[in-house]
Amino acid sequence: MYVAVVGKGLVGAEFVDQLLSLPVPSNPFNIFSISSSKKTWIRPQGLVHTEWKKAFESSASDASDTVTLLKSTLGTEMETLVKAGHKVVLVDNTSSDTIAQLYPRFLSAGVNVITPNKKAFSSDLTLYEEILTAGMSSGAKFYNESTVGAGLPVISTLKDLVTTGDNVSKIEGVFSGTMSYIFNNFSTSSRNGPTFSSVVTKARELGYTEPHPADDLNGADVARKLTILSRFIPELLPLLPQGYISVDTKSLVPPALKNIATGDEFIQALPTFDDAMERLRTEALQEGKVLRYVGVIDVATQTIKASLEKYDVNHAFATSLGGSDNIIMFHTNRYGERPLIIQGAGAGAAVTAMGVLSDLLRFT
């Protein structure tokens, strides 16, 4: 099976390392192409593990951009391999919306697609339906486990529940590693905790947030993940015609800071709004609860929302989380009295790449 890897950043490089560390006799994959935003390396005979980074740097050709490459040289090479009877997989490790728009083309041509890129599956319903149609017409597959929960088996579990006939009534969870870290440290059962702005600042220093923390605090990442999950539940498919934009999302970005251009300026201004978050924390403490930023898909009421909610101090969302963990609960007919819970690291290159690799191994 021929594999074209697009994106060689933290996740992309880790994915290549993990794939090439599989036992050689049983490894059926041939990485014939690796592309970054400015360079591409294509070698149909494949590569050797100890050489790949050196080979890429020394022999990769300049490329104007990845999208142009996919529309021309690399795209043609993949389609030629399919026509010759080979199985081909495009592994998109970018977060590019433009590359996501090309998925229908490649699926139609018989190229399988695996990606942690959330854009294609959380945008307009039209694109998602084009992806489904393209795959059905050619028989090519797409897998996107790492778009929700990194390497956690969230999507595969939901698909198994649905395809085996279980009735999913509700999905709720802490889907953002950034929000998990922030509220695990800001809202606890003890009093006199740190200020909200200091926790956000620390999260940024540790690399848990985007360079501009507003990109996390606005809830868009959680909304995208809810969109992706909801689209595996047939009765919810029409609910989000504009994708994540259609999700009822509560932003934690103060309106006065909404248009601040840089992350540094945002961090400097955020302490002005600590009092408002302190009031919410105090109110929760008085009720014996903690604050958690959660996503909820309620099938019965057809409600899909991302918001800051209160949970009892004995609830799993209060007691089970640490660091930047994700936790997702599935309420179904079969898991009625006690929900099915998936929990663990929801971010990081190693676990994200593992999720991508696990999708690739579905072809073996």
Image (tube, rainbow, N blue to C red):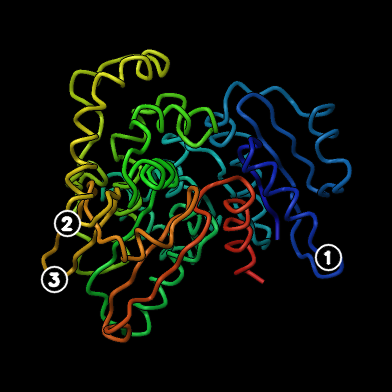
Gap in angstroms between the C-alphas marked 1 and 3 = 47 Å
- From the viewer's perspective, is the residue at label 3 or at label 2 nearer? 3
- Amino acid type for the residue under numbered disc 1: Pro
**In the rendered image, the vertical position of residue 59 relative to residue 126, given as above or below:** above
Residue with the mark numbered 3: 300
Gap in angstroms between the C-alphas marked 3 and 2 = 13 Å
- Amino acid type for the residue under numbered disc 3: Ala
Answer with mark 3 or mark 2, whichever residue precedes in sequence.
Answer: 2
Label 3: how many residues lie within 10 Å, few (<14), some (14-19) or many (20+)? few
The residue under the point 31% across, 85% down is 165
Answer with mark 1 or mark 3, whichever residue precedes in sequence.
Answer: 1
| Label annotation for residue 23 | 1
Observer-nearest residue: 335 or 243?
335
Please provide percent x and percent y for residue 84.
68, 58
Classify mark 3: helix, strand or loop: loop
The residue under the point 36% across, 31% down is 215
Work out which residue is located at the far left of the displayed protein and give it.
301
Q: Quadrant of residue 30?
A: bottom right
Please provide percent x and percent y for residue 34.
70, 39
- Amino acid type for the residue under numbered disc 2: Leu
